[in-house]
Amino acid sequence: MAYASPADLLSRFDRNILADLAGDDGQPAEPLSSPRVARALEGASGEINAAARMGGRYSPEELAALQGDDAEFLKDITCQLALLRLVGTRIQTIGELAHKSLREAAEKVLDDLRAGRLVFGTPAAERAQTPGVDGPTV
């Protein structure tokens, strides 16, 4: 299950660019119904799941249950990764240097997710806190 929909992708990026990337034969295609867009969103969600699993921080069920600004941020990450997948099929569209810098930014977010520097508001994360110390004092 993708963490973002084609409509989420369209609300974040230019429709014309997405239509160009959604088509397989050099002709623009409707991003909302494009199998290529759907696969990119699914692959991006899988990449997020892999990072969360590697960090041992979140299950796919916890991520899917996010709400509010946490859910919107997860959609942002998913859409950014999906766009990178789509652009990667036509790297000449934005150039290798631009693609590389976008990919590095996405990798930083995934690394932060793995390391726990990026924390979503799941029930477990909200219950976690710095342990209190109860004992003798100086």
Image (spheres, rainbow, N blue to C red):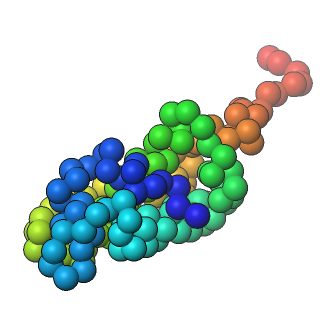
Q: Tell me which corner region of the image, top left, top right, bottom left or bottom right, holds residue 31.
A: bottom left
Q: Residue at (35%, 69%) from the top-left corner?
A: 34
Q: Residue at (89%, 24%) from the top-left corner?
A: 135
Q: Considering depth in this image, is 80 or 55 the residue closer to the camera?
A: 80
Q: Considering depth in this image, is 112 or 35 the residue closer to the camera?
A: 35
| Any part of residue 120 in sight | yes
Give the image location of residue 33, x and y in percent: 38, 65
- Left or right, 82 with reference to 61: left
Quadrant containing the N terminus is bottom right
Q: Residue at (40%, 49%) from the top-left corner?
A: 8
| Residue projecting furthest to the top | 138
| Residue projecting furthest to the bottom | 25
Q: Tell me which corner region of the image, top left, top right, bottom left or bottom right, holds residue 56.
A: bottom right
| Any part of residue 112 in sight | no
Give the image location of residue 64, x and y in percent: 63, 52
Give the image location of residue 6, x and y in percent: 40, 57
Relative height, residue 123 to residue 90 (above, below):
above
Give the image location of residue 99, x and y in percent: 20, 65
Q: Considering depth in this image, is 126 or 29 the residue closer to the camera?
A: 29
Relative height, residue 110 to residue 132 (above, below):
below
Relative height, residue 121 to residue 85 (above, below):
above
Quadrant containing the C terminus is top right
Q: Residue at (32%, 50%) from the top-left corner?
A: 10
- Left or right, 63 with reference to 76: right
- Number of labelled discs? 0
